[in-house]
Amino acid sequence: MHDVIIIGAGPAGLSAGITCANKGLKVLIIDEYMKPGGRLLGQLYEEPNGNWWNGIKESANLYHQALAADVKFMLETPVHNLEKIESEWTVYTEQEILKTEHLLLATGAAESPIPVPGWTLPGVMSVGAAQVMTNVHRVKPGKKGIIIGVNVLSSAIAMELQLADVEVAALTLPKLNQLTSLAAQPKAVMDSLLHVSHMAPSAFIRFGSKLMKNDFMKNLGVTFYPKNGVKMWDIPIHLRKAVIEIYGEDQVEGVTLATIDTNGKVIQGTEEQITCDFVCIAGGLYPLAELAAVAGCPFYQVDELGGYVPLHNEQMETTLDGLYVAGNITGIEGAKVAMAQGVTAGLSIAVNSGMSGLDNELQTSIQSIKQARANAHIQFHPEVEEGKRIVQEHWEEFEASVANISV
Amino acid sequence: MSERILDHPVLGSLENTEEVSFTFNGQSFKGRKHESIAAALLANGVRTLRYHEENGTPRGIYCNIGHCFECRVKVNGKQGVRACLTPLEDGTVVESGNKLPTPVRDWSAEHA
């Protein structure tokens, strides 16, 4: 019997597990992936102080801390159902059925696909897939790739691909359709890109990149829609062109690009072909909340957080007894925020398990989440603070309604 | 085509891991022990992991982290295994799914 079961061995789940175990609770962490670390594993970027954030090292560090605190792991173990039976949560895995009083969902995020004609060809993959291949498995996704979708994540991964000596021929927009909407409109994409300009790392200047972040900013400001696109870290970014087709016989051989107007509409007769052997699709991230839905959590759609999030409070509790959430399931943010949320969730679980004297520690940990958010290197959604406020408001409404019922 | 990243400016050199043998559709390949089957195949230049059950079009990896189920293959006789989540062992036998003799659409129409 485990006091706590955590689903997800990413930064949130590992931090929560370490926190709970250090408070004397018996913890089991389940993940369907074969390595602990979640998507932290693939992350690689240079921080403003010149240090590299190496997700593999950070993951290993958290994993070893968890093992040292006697946290148990079940990796390669998908969870497909949850059920509350009396006071216990039942967790159905492919291996066995487990029970616990405290269950934390730290399931992270998933990538939204962008359907483009030809996207089922081998060689087309999500941008996160290319990141995992390159940084975790150390296999190049191909020789030369095109990235469809210009956003914070795809810009960061384009840079990581370059680091690994994989050619990124261009970042372009997807063709406008009912599903792509904002991601296909140059103006909206331009606005969102302003949030990544600071990421141009000094290392690229050391590695011989001719473009510095100021030039990038200048290009954006001076010529808002340059005909041949702007370049970021020597990668052309085409905000006036969209991929209208991915072509190839048995696998990707190239893409057809067309010029689009400022509203994203294709201008006929402007089609050109770029050869490549892989294509990444970058549709952005959304909270992976299926298990919370199965459990019966109420949800709110909060665009500032990336999609539907289960209702939760600052202590990372949901409206369901013994069910907690932490990390990207509560909104799309970076690993450091997820780690801080994991600590808070762990402390909440300890408090609800009957441990006293943790109030100050819990309050401090809630403040640490806000601090991590304020200092985040990559802000996926610039309005994330607003998103968190909206969730908090819904929580207060929920509490008021419960109070009314009990009166 | 794809190749292994042996040296990386930040991540350093690739740790030496044990080399193992495996087969994919009867063909012999070498991979690294405990890497994902998807990574091992890509490092060998294999992009097509299966053919669509209904229309026979080739499919490869899409999400590489188990969400999309595009990379499902038969591993040591077990069907529907995700190549991106399954570690390679010595002697692993991997097989592609193929177009079904009776397309799903026809079958479901008859059994509606």
Image: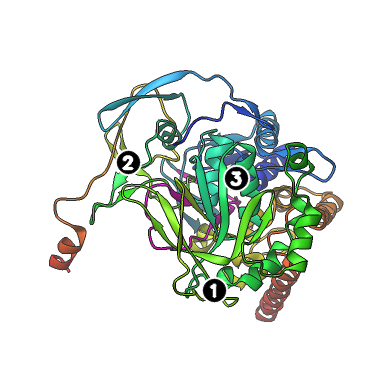
The residue beneath circle 1 is: A181
The residue beneath circle 2 is: B73
Q: How far apart are marks 1 and 3 (CA)?
A: 27 Å
Task: Decide which of tag 1 and tag 3 comes sooner along the chain.
Answer: 3
Region rendered in magenta: A97-125
Q: Which of A328 and A174 is in front in this view?
A: A174
The residue beneath circle 3 is: A39
For the N terminus of chain A, the image quarter is: top right
* Residue type at the position of mark 1: Ser
For the C terminus of chain A, the image quarter is: bottom right
* Residue type at the position of mark 3: Arg
- Measured as percent of width and height from the top left, residue A276 is found at 46, 48
Residue at position x 87%, y 52% from top?
A: A360
Residue A255 seen in the current view: yes
| Residue A117 falls within the magenta-colored stretch | yes
Residue at position x 36%, y 47% from top?
A: A251
Residue at position x 77%, y 41% from top?
A: A205
Quadrant hosting residue A87:
bottom right
- Measured as percent of width and height from the top left, residue A51 is found at 80, 38
Q: Nearer the viewer, residue B49 or A295?
A: B49
Q: Dot 1 surroundings within 10 Å: few (below 14), some, or many (20 or more)?
A: some
